Amino acid sequence: MTSVETIALDPDTEEVYLVRERLTTIGNLGFLRRVLRINLRWNRLTRIEGLNNLDTLTELILFDNQIAKLENLSTIPNLRHLDVSYNRIHKLEGLDSLPNLAELYLCHNKITKIENLDHLANLRVLELGDNRIKKIENLEGLSKLEELHLGANHIREIENLECLAKTLKVLDLPANAITRIQGLETLAKLETLSIAQNGIRYIEGLDKLRKLKVLDLNDNIIEQLDNVSMLKRLEKLWIRKIQNINPAVLAEELHQLGRLEHLVIEGTELARTDDYRKVVLEVLPHLKQLDSYPVWWVPGDPWQVKPDDV
């Protein structure tokens, strides 16, 4: 099987689901009068084409194909969800005719620059993880953006985010080359921040993030736990492999965080002691999960049942 149009499809169908069918071309799908969702994941498509006059289409998934260019999207103006992750895209382009697009996923491509997004005024989610991007830039036109995912790129500095101050809630920057937490001062609505797997030594630049609920600093080279006590709404803190941590430090920095429920400190010197869970829970009795386990879990007992009073 090579083309979608060779398959018998009901012209009035609302969903096309052709996954792992070894398709090489889309063909002409203009006869689909009521289609809302098209999923062509895990095929061998090399081009975006054949989507003529699909005014009803709101979701298009082309995940894991061999597409090299974003093109021929002008005939689907009501598209809200576009996923072309795990392809061979080199450039952000061809999106000008998608004013209603709310979610754009382009993870694991070969994109080198954030550009040509000015017309996406309704975009809420932008996923550009695992590309070759070196700089955060050209986001000024994204006036409704709530989530920005840029993990596993080549970014060295957190910058140019002031334009997202009124909307951004999730900032995802793991596995880059960032060495300093900065450029976040205006992001008053930020709720989730991930800067795991970078080269950060000091926790800083967070004092304006009063709505932050999730902070992921796993697998950095942080020397000391500090400057988090002002994050009163923090619910999850992940600081795996942080240095110089002990019960006194935990108590000083975290005891005032009454909403903190999840804490990850595995890989630290403290976590290598036999009774570390007991020690930590004495200092932070309001925790619900410590590292990978709920606080009531007893290591070594695979048959235990969650207590009734938890």
Image: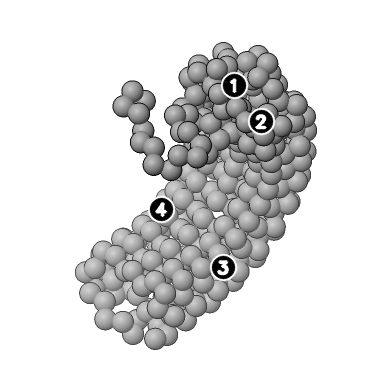
Mark 1 element type: helix
Q: Mark 1 points at which residue?
A: 279
Q: Residue at x 33, y 69 (%)?
A: 17
Q: Which residue is drawn at 21% across and 69% down?
A: 12
Where 93 sits versus 69, above or below? above
Q: Which of marks 1 and 3 is in front?
A: 1
Q: Which of marks 4 and 3 is in front?
A: 3
Q: Name the residue under label 4.
A: 80
Where 221 sits versus 232, above or below? below
Mark 4 and 1 residues: CB-CB less than 8 Å, in contact?
no
Mark closer to the chain start, 4 or 1 = 4
> How far across and down, in percent of the image, does residue 64 sit?
51, 68
Mark closer to the chain start, 4 or 2 = 4
Mark 4 element type: loop
C-alpha separation, residue under disc 1 versus residue under disc 3? 48 Å
Mark closer to the chain start, 4 or 3 = 4
Q: Does residue 294 appear in the picture of this structure?
A: no
Disc 3: CA contacts within 10 A as few (<14), some (14-19) or many (>=20)? many
Q: Mark 2 points at which residue?
A: 273
Q: Nearer the viewer, residue 188 or 178?
A: 178
Disc 1: CA contacts within 10 A as few (<14), some (14-19) or many (>=20)? some
Q: Which residue is drawn at 36% across and 66% down?
A: 38
Mark closer to the chain start, 1 or 2 = 2
Amino acid bearing label 4: Arg
Q: Mark 3 points at which residue?
A: 87
C-alpha separation, residue under disc 4 versus residue under disc 3? 20 Å
Mark 4 and 2 residues: CB-CB less than 8 Å, in contact?
no
Q: Nearer the viewer, residue 73 or 146?
A: 146
